[in-house]
Image (cartoon, rainbow, N blue to C red):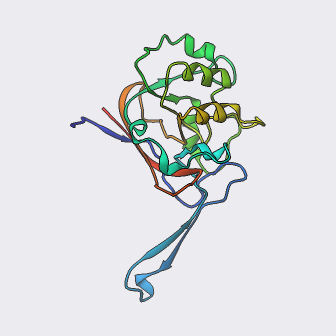
Amino acid sequence: MNFNKLYDVSVPIHPGLTVWHGDPSLEIVQTNKISEGAAANVSQIKMGVHTGTHMDAPVHFIEGATGIDTLPLEALVGTVLVLEINPTGAHIEATDLEKLDLPDTFERIIFKTRNSEFWNDNTHFRRDFVALNPSGAEWLLQRGLKLVGIDYLSIERFDCEDYPTHRLLLSNKVVILEGLDLRAIEPGEYTLMALPLKIENADGAPARVFLAK
């Protein structure tokens, strides 16, 4: 498989990276140092599984459901449509998606919104990000979607209580990909390669994500 261009749309993991409000902070510590006489440099990393670019597993919001290590690989690699969308309201609704006249052939969709610009300063958490409203999630489910991604730390608006968008998607085995950096990405069709760490039974995992043309 040959590509003209590969785009890394993962957020770099580094000390000070913003995390979801209330999640564990990110710590990277070099425990062994050659400069201090060790045979090799060795580092320890401590962070939540929903840090940076990551995926959610069904068990994230559904008690007793499957973990990140059971996500279907066929959903994580394949053709994806990157949509640049500026919703009329605060969040992406079914009416916004209807206006786009999308083809029925796409099984994976990634939303590029004004959220992408938040990565220009990723040292503090933003609550005013664009998310996918439950009506938008229902609209996508009716079209047999396998994966949906967005360019901030959650597919769901910050101030919700029951997390209906997550529950709708995860209960229907739709993979949720969050924390994408789409600043350099033009809307259009790409090949997606999105691979989470294989952490047994975990509710999520950081992922390295590429788009290819």
Residue at (66, 43) in percent of width and height: 62
Residue 55, percent from left and from top = 53, 45
Q: Is residue 149 left or right of residue 127?
A: left
Q: Nearer the viewer, residue 190 or 124?
A: 190
Residue 71, percent from left and from top = 48, 44
* Residue at the bottom extreme, as displayed: 37
Q: Is residue 119 visible?
A: yes
Seen in the picture, residue 23 relative to 151 is either above or below; the reply is below
Q: Is residue 84 left or right of residue 168?
A: left
Residue 120, percent from left and from top = 55, 43
Residue 116, percent from left and from top = 54, 36
Residue at (51, 19) in percent of width and height: 143
* Residue at the front extreme, as displayed: 64
Q: In which quarter of the view is residue 202 placed?
A: bottom right
Please tell me how many numbered marks the rendered image carries: 0
Quarter of the image where the C terminus is located: top left
Seen in the picture, residue 188 relative to 28 is either above or below; the reply is above
Q: Nearer the viewer, residue 115 or 164?
A: 164
Seen in the picture, residue 27 relative to 49 is either above or below; the reply is below
Q: Is residue 11 visible?
A: no
Seen in the picture, residue 30 relative to 145 is either above or below; the reply is below
* Residue at the left extreme, as displayed: 2
Q: Is residue 56 left or right of residue 211?
A: right
Q: Nearer the viewer, residue 39 or 74?
A: 74
Quarter of the image where the N terminus is located: top left
